Amino acid sequence: MADDVISVKDLVKVYDDVRAVDGITFAVEKGEVFAFLGPNGAGKTTTVEIIETIRDATSGEVSILGMDVKKNRTEILKRIGVLPQEFSSFDRLTVEETLKYYAALFCTDCDINKLIDLVNLEEHRKKLYINLSGGLKQRVGIAVSLVNDPEIIFLDEPTTGLDPRARHDVWEVIKGLKKEGKTIFLTTHYMEEAEVLADYIAIISKGKIIAYGTTTELIDKHFKTVKVTIKGGTEGVGSLAEKMGMPTQGRDNGNITIEASGNEQIVEFLNALKANNISYLSMDIRKPNLEELFLVLTGEALIDKRVTQ
């Protein structure tokens, strides 16, 4: 496709007798946020490092901005930005000094003021890196990845270990980058992060792409029911649901969760509860989310045990 800025075709990486990446194909379009998800050992990191020109493939084709990663490494590196996992910088430099240092390192004449504004660090520009919170340090890292004004930005676990407030602040920065027309390649352990930010998602497991599409497309494809939790229901809720062909999934503290095929069946169930004089306190209707999809497809939870609680 003409709008593809990353193209991966039949990519294979073999270590001794292990196929870490097993013939995967996908593409990323200009200006989108693309989330690449997978459990540990799935081949995710190897794939990303090949795309970033850090590692060589065994076979297959990978191009960035229309350039082969094997033949055009120097030119590609000028046009991409990378935020590595657990980014760290010099403790005794201020935010402004840090960005000036990296700009000089990359021989770029970037607008430091614009960069600071883009990642919302204006009030922190004179603070030493060592005195910044984890969320602010990650924003500095994102700014560093932008000093060469890249067209594509690779963000590897950009909110690892951050508290919810700091995580949301970083999300806003990423949304701002998209508005600027940047293409974002995101790897994350947070399913909510992928749901909020990503236009397209690819899930890799055991070296193969097992799901590819938007969140809505993937959930609609793999789940045909919604979950309905009846809270504080009187006797007969579960048996009525079963009678109407709505399987019950579990009971917890007097609450019961059932599966419904859609809104029409839910309305029928509500009418049946009323007709049978079965009362309840409240009802929660929820479609399956990306985390549940991930568990179904991979059999594993994507958990970061370093998350700040």
Image (tube, rainbow, N blue to C red):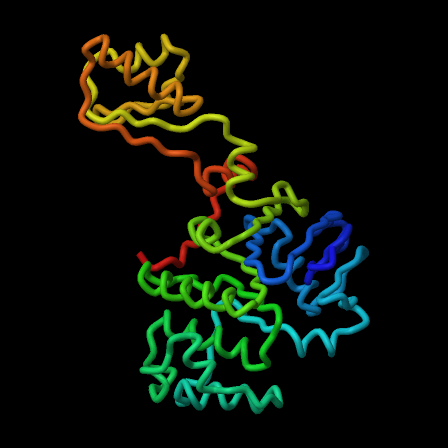
Compared to 202, does 221 lie above or below?
above
Compared to 51, does 117 lie above or below?
below
Location of the N terminus by quadrant is: bottom right
- Please provide percent x and percent y for residue 256: 29, 23
Location of the C terminus by quadrant is: bottom left
Picture quadrant where residue 66 is located: bottom right
Q: Nearer the viewer, residue 179 or 199?
A: 179
| Residue drawn at 81 percent across, 71 percent down | 71
| Residue drawn at 35 percent across, 89 percent down | 126
Compared to 296, does 124 lie above or below?
below
The number of discs equals: 0
- Please provide percent x and percent y for residue 299: 53, 37
Q: Nearer the viewer, residue 37 or 278?
A: 278
Compared to 97, does 274 lie above or below?
above
* Direction from residue 188 to residue 239 in the image, left or right: left
Q: Nearer the viewer, residue 40 or 101?
A: 101
* Direction from residue 109 to residue 226 in the image, left or right: left
| Residue drawn at 76 percent across, 54 percent down | 16
Picture quadrant where residue 30 is located: bottom right
- Please provide percent x and percent y for residue 184: 56, 63
